[in-house]
Image (cartoon, grey):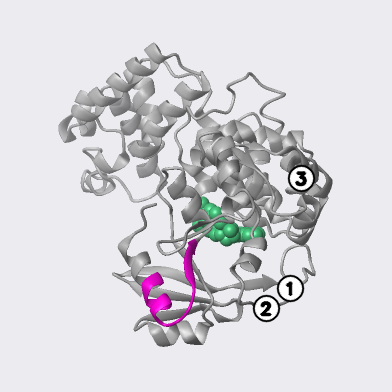
Amino acid sequence: MEIPQAVEKIIDTLEAGGFEAYAVGGCVRDTLLGREPEDWDITTSARPEQVKKLFRRTVDTGIQHGTVTVLENHRGYEVTTYRIDGEYEDGRHPKNVEFTASLTEDLKRRDFTINAMAYSKKTGIVDEFGGMEDLKRGVIRCVGKAQERFTEDALRILRAIRFSAQLGFEIEEQTLEAVRQIAPNLVHVSKERIQVELTKLLKSPHPERMSLVFAAGIAPFVSAHFADAGDPGREHAANWLSAEFAPEKYVRWAAFLRDLDEKEGERILKELKADNDTISRVRLLAAYWKCPLEADKYQLRCAMSRMSGEMFDCLLGFRLAAGTDSRKKWEELSAMTEEIRRDGDCISLKTLAVTGNDLIAAGMKPGREIGLRLGEMFEEVLRHPEHNTKEYLLRF
Ligand code: ATP
Ligand code: MG
């Protein structure tokens, strides 16, 4: 297995200090799958204060949980002491954590077999729960008894579905059964954390797995109105929610919520504490994704004048993925959009050849009237871009 030099160096340093150390969790899983890991985590028998002594640059990220970030080549690597999670008190957080000298104990607390493997050059892959086998077979399975693991921490329920969507894996039978049983505990999980998991699910190569959230009876516990969105697998055509949609967060959320009216969709996003930028982009897509749009330059300029160029391109792609426009139509619309841009047609008040000051200089009184006149001129120019000159518009 290939691991980055910086990670190897950190592990070497810990070993030279007399401790055990391994790359662990998601990074091992992703490397074995040939995916690029987002971050590299290291697990070690060294206590946080011992880790800090061995490295020049460290940050106390979560000392009470045993985590120190080691900076190496301007990147941070989380180094966490082997630990056992104490009793869980609220269906989400362990009351306390306990350090341990045993790698096996540390691996045991991890959620799924594929996330519970460790690796070092010295020892090779440590796989005590059949993670390798599950990776090969494409299975998400809890470490230990699924019911207990989900009862400890209900976020794992959504993580199971999210990993199944990201990796295209099936959820093993008993794990899936426990997902169904423990789903009501999701009310203990913060909305932000739920949203992060659902966003990862939607952005994955299998956004259609959102239907599992409904099929497994989780939807009513996600947020007050989440279930209104409807099961994308049952209530819609087979590819209603697919990877055809661009993988941006707001595109996938808009795709998922597109059957609701704008207000309802926005309410769900607010319940899940989505950020304002996402909400406003989803609102825009919701407003325009199925409105009539012909391959007509005036219509296109009007639509383009209502949003950024980026969002307009996004809208065209969205309509194609949603089946609003055929591919042929999308090609026509895209080509026309390109022409409008190439010709520099005025699609914004900012590039109108006449400004409020021009009208005042021409003798108009400052006030509401000016805005109305400018609006009329803009409308004229959207129809006839060649009329966007000062001479023409002032006469107009
Ligand atoms: P990704 O980074 O792609 O979201 P990951 O598997 O790396 O996936 P992280 O949240 O970064 O997930 O966590 C790193 C590791 O910590 C996991 O692989 C798993 O071993 C463990 N872990 C994370 N969250 C939990 C949890 N809620 N319960 C048990 N173990 C967890
Ligand atoms: Mg990770």
Question: Disc 2 designates what residue?
Answer: 98
Query: Between disc 3 and disc 1, whose residue precedes?
Result: 1
Numbered disc in front, either 3 or 1:
1
- Residue holding disc 1: 86
Q: Which residue is mark 3?
A: 179
Query: Considering the numbered disc 1 on the image, is that residue within a helix, a strand or a loop?
Result: loop
- The residue sitting at 54% across, 41% down in the picture is 166
Determine whether 130 is above or below 49 in the image. above
Q: Is residue 74 left or right of residue 239?
A: left
Q: Which residues are magenta?
A: 11-23
Quarter of the image for residue 372 reads top left
**Residues at marks 2 and 1 touching, judged by CB atoms closer than 8 Å:** yes
The secondary element bearing badge 3 is classed as helix
Q: Residues within 10 Å of mark 1 (few under 14, many from 20)?
A: some
Q: Amino acid at mark 3?
A: Val
Residue 382 located within the stretch drawn in magenta: no
Q: Residue at x 32, y 49 (%)?
A: 365
- The kind of residue on which mark 2 rests is Glu
Q: First in sequence: mark 3 or mark 2?
A: 2
Give the CA separation, mark 3 to mark 2: 27 Å
Classify residue 307 by image quadrant. top left
Tag nearer the camera, 3 or 2: 2
